[in-house]
Image (spheres, coloured by chain):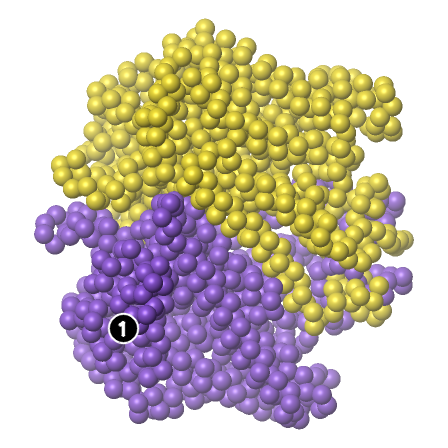
Chain colours: A yellow, B purple
Amino acid sequence: MEKLKKYVSVKDEDQFYHQGAVELLVFNFLLILTILTIWLFKNHRFRFLHETGGAMLYGLVMGLIIRYATKASDVDSGTVYECEKLKSGPSTLLINITNQVYEYQYKREISHHNVNGHQGNAMLQKMTFDPSIFFNILLPPIIFHAGYSLKKRHFFRNLGSILTYAFLGTAISCIVIGLIMYGFVKAMLHIGQLKGWEFHFTDCLFFGSLMSATDPVTVLAIFHELHVDTDLYTLLFGESVLNDAVAIVLTYSISIYSPKENPNAFDAAAFFQSVGNFLGIFAGSFAMGSSYAVVTALISFMHLTKFTKLCEFPMLETGLFFLLSWSAFLSAEAAGLTGIVAVLFCGVTQAHYTYNNLSPDSKMRTKQLFEFMNFLAENVIFCYMGLALFTFQNHIFSPLFIFGAFVAVFVARACNIYPLSFLLNLGRKQKIPRNFQHMMMFSGLRGAIAFALAIRDTESQPKQMMFTTALLIVFFTVWVFGGGTTPMLTWLQIRVGIDPDEDLKAEAANETASNLDKNTTKAESAWLFRIWYGFDHKYLKPILTHAGPPLTTTLPEWCNPVARLLTSPSAYGDQLKDDGTDYIINNDELTENYESSAHIPGPAQDRTGFTQATGKEHIHEGDLGLGGYELQLEHTAGQPQMNSLA
Amino acid sequence: MEKLKKYVSVKDEDQFYHQGAVELLVFNFLLILTILTIWLFKNHRFRFLHETGGAMLYGLVMGLIIRYATKASDVDSGTVYECEKLKSGPSTLLINITNQVYEYQYKREISHHNVNGHQGNAMLQKMTFDPSIFFNILLPPIIFHAGYSLKKRHFFRNLGSILTYAFLGTAISCIVIGLIMYGFVKAMLHIGQLKGWEFHFTDCLFFGSLMSATDPVTVLAIFHELHVDTDLYTLLFGESVLNDAVAIVLTYSISIYSPKENPNAFDAAAFFQSVGNFLGIFAGSFAMGSSYAVVTALISFMHLTKFTKLCEFPMLETGLFFLLSWSAFLSAEAAGLTGIVAVLFCGVTQAHYTYNNLSPDSKMRTKQLFEFMNFLAENVIFCYMGLALFTFQNHIFSPLFIFGAFVAVFVARACNIYPLSFLLNLGRKQKIPRNFQHMMMFSGLRGAIAFALAIRDTESQPKQMMFTTALLIVFFTVWVFGGGTTPMLTWLQIRVGIDPDEDLKAEAANETASNLDKNTTKAESAWLFRIWYGFDHKYLKPILTHAGPPLTTTLPEWCNPVARLLTSPSAYGDQLKDDGTDYIINNDELTENYESSAHIPGPAQDRTGFTQATGKEHIHEGDLGLGGYELQLEHTAGQPQMNSLA
């Protein structure tokens, strides 16, 4: 007991800061190691371990070291004190101990069966940081970046399919996993496991919904490196982005589903309330996210005569962009909606409207900033996942449940991809070929979102078992499926080495502002989408951005005075530039490296390219720039069998 | 009491996250307001309120609203509970309340006189966040950015003067403030104030050391906009950067000064131990910071034959750069040194060595990343300062102490600047003119560091009084002196509108690698510095960077085999480029705006400029780019009286 004094005396207050420093240093060290490893792998064109997989591996090793190499400190956190005077736990507690008052802050409620799990190692306790950090700090930049870097042209061309996979597919996956797991749980109860546990069908559905969030970051990185077919890439990327949003809201809706009587019986009222919750939260978050983005677009678009535009001050512009996007997340959270969903749609809307108004400098700054934040956050999460296997205190390994979950996850993925692809192919002009379907089936990796959803609540024993199982599934899928992507591509004979700019350029060449709408209809897009596209192009874009035709030409004649007021002066001259601003060049695409383009003189180098509003020349490849290009060349040259279309 | 339930029931656990969201949203809102205001001001060329002053003002208003417009919640945090079983406060406390176990986390020790101050508003409590956040999260990026953007050429030319002001000047300032405050405290005790307080001379010195950290961010921003004389700018910037480090270590050394007997009597042993502590911590932090930077330089410089250089992967490079720099901070903290000092020298060393090895893309990325983090962190701190005036619970306003502090701060600044300038002018070839001295005297603003040092410990009553006083001095100096900078420049007839590139270019023109050393000696630099410069140029730079002469020419002949091994292949061809890489173009300098330079065709546009290792064309102005240029033109044209050299 005496040794505890060092934790509380004022003189050693700094000890607390230093403790925090040590933990952060551990993470820094792991990330540095990961970066150096990835550098090594990139040099050897070794594509079996993606940086996220590497981060997870190092986290695992570090967790092992912390668990078994550091000695257990003597923190008596297993002791429970009685406090008769209190009726409930206040958020702050002042306690008088030997005539000195200490302030304690409420952390959480603990189930009785977990009290003993808190014994032991202080370092272990410190390393298992607050799960809310995942949701409030690490996930938002990742999700925003996904939305912001969505390749809109390809995305909208496949919108119908993506929405089907994301909404219907996730629902199917959730229900299938739920049903299979319910079977396994029943069997486990039958053979005498899980004695005294409360394990309802809703718990199984909860597990189903959290395991339905796919995260093919490894696969997509390899697709990007190898320049796999753009449609396949877009389908997978679009599905995984939207599917996260759906899975998060679904998990939340299920967790607040509370039937009045028997929790196993079906309660229609409660069910419909859950469906209503799902729709309300999804729509509310969508509205919140997009409205913040629209405000950003309006501010960055302001063209008052006496005012210098905001884009003259790139730092203010970037700051405003960042703060308003973050506010979308925070407002949604404060309003009881889902911040992650809000920030996703905020990202999509920012890319669609605000991006066009930004100065070239800010375009680059925002792009690079979010890319960097995404890179760091992703690696921290995967690193933490590795750590969690050994540092989390209340793992419950149940072989039968784990086996059941593996079966359920794969069956559910199959029930999602194959039937839906069949249905979609009935309507699609450009069918989704068999090998694409197999690849999508194979790319059903689970990652950051599934983990974050599982760690959010680990109080009850069923939830702890789910967390352990989810963690193992993440490990398995990231390492095995992630590592097997390249062989799988070869085996499925999927075309690689495609320049995604090529078909865009070809399209752009025979497109002018006037026949843009017609051209889009060539794709599979549904009538609903076509109507929206027309509305967006004719009215929203001119009001919110410098792009699009002037309102004076799109609005009826009697609206002319209003139209003139709302139209940017630059819109009149920019009509032909519009289609160029319709998509962002991002890490989905092969851009020429900055240096190399500057080195090569000659007519191919369009000098004005540097000032074009698309920012095409300004956006650099992230970690995959030149390396990716080289890999692509190697592949197209050395492995011609991979270039054949199945 | 019943209402408290909402804070603790598991169902409402999310309530806690949402609470955090609301607070962050308040800050976001304030920062957005600040940015919009600054934009407005920049449009009207209104230079009386810098963004930091604006952030402070909005924070103040928001603090007022939170204080008086939100109703006090009924958190019974004023109640102290007894716990006889505990002998000391453990870091985690499990409490059984009505048969449910809650986990509480140790926050801090509270003095008995502060217990009642904790009553009331939960919102107020939430807004006063942990002071360690300042030191661990908000200050490091600001300090690193200061080090990273140090204009080295001008800095080294004035190194002697800067070191004198920073070390000797800060010590003088600390002692003068300490002595004056001790007089005031004695007087206050004499007239019956401060009854029963313990207020020693060391407490006065503590106040002196924390008030010695100057932060002329407002003044420097205006200097930058108006392009004030570079020497004046460098003197002030260099002093303020180093002075922060000195003040922080000084404050820490004084706070652990513990004479054995009478705390008012002079204890030689304890005094020398404090001096030893100061030197040890300063040197240790310096070593820690620079060694991390050297490691970064070495990694980024690696040129193994089979390896692609790290600079081919800008994202990995930026990530490594960021993580290693942050590790410098964390390692220093973990080792009991001062992280802020470590991160400062890490920044300086990174700029000196690593920057030369980075790819053009990474140069831009790191520059912009830290610039952005600096911008956000600075505004958050100033915003929080405004808030703190109303949300901090234990202010002690003592008119006499405040008056004394104001007198002390100005007297101390005068005792620092004028005598030291006199002494320095004895040795300097280029004297520091009278009006520069007045301007430096005037620019003794207090800001983020003084505030962060004061808020670190607000337990005892003297410390609370110091905190309140420090806050008021920050308000006064930032608003009054910050706002008065432009009139003061006019009044002192200080030259503005100087192109800092011009004299650098002139220098560079008649400099070649061979006579570089001689040229440097023209400046005031001392022999010690000259030796170091030679060593750095001949040996360190070639080993750590692509710049500098090849080692084969600088090392003695018998070292040739080693030299060949260590020299970068590119060094042989780069001899003449070296002086260009010796400084970073940063926000101290007038760079042509990216867009405007791209718009203007013609021979002035050197195409190869884009690929030069200096990254000169790549680094953009932050928030001051074009705006600053315009302002400068306006001034040189409209106010010719300001252009005369006194």
- Is residue B488 something that shows in the picture? no
Residue B501 vs A252, above or below: the answer is: below
**Residue name at image x 42 percent, y 55 percent:** B299
Looking at this view, is A485 or B27 the one in front? A485
Quarter that holds the C terminus of chain A: top left
Residue B497 image-quadrant placement: bottom left
Left or right of B202 in this view: B423:
left
Q: Mark 1 points at which residue?
A: B230
- Chain letter for mark 1: B
Question: Hey, what amino acid is under mark 1?
Answer: Thr
Q: Which of A610 and B44 is in front in this view?
A: A610
Within 10 angstroms of label 1, few (less than 14), some, or many (20 or more) residues?
many
Whole-percent x and y of residue B12? 71, 40
> Dot 1: what SS?
helix
- Residue B137 visible, this angle: yes
Q: Can you say whether B25 is above or below A14 in the image?
A: above
* Residue lying at 40% horizontally and 31% vertically, measured from the top left: A224
Q: Which residue lies furthest to the top in this view?
A: A426
Q: List x then y, in percent, for residue B329.
A: 53, 62
Q: In which quarter of the image is residue A534?
A: top left
**From this viewpoint, which residue is outermost toward the left?**
B603
Q: In this view, does B637 lie to the left or right of A237?
A: left
Total numbered labels placed on residues in the image: 1
Task: Indicate the quadrant containing the N terminus of chain A: top left, top right, bottom left or bottom right.
Answer: bottom right
Pick the residue in front: B331 or A612.
Answer: B331
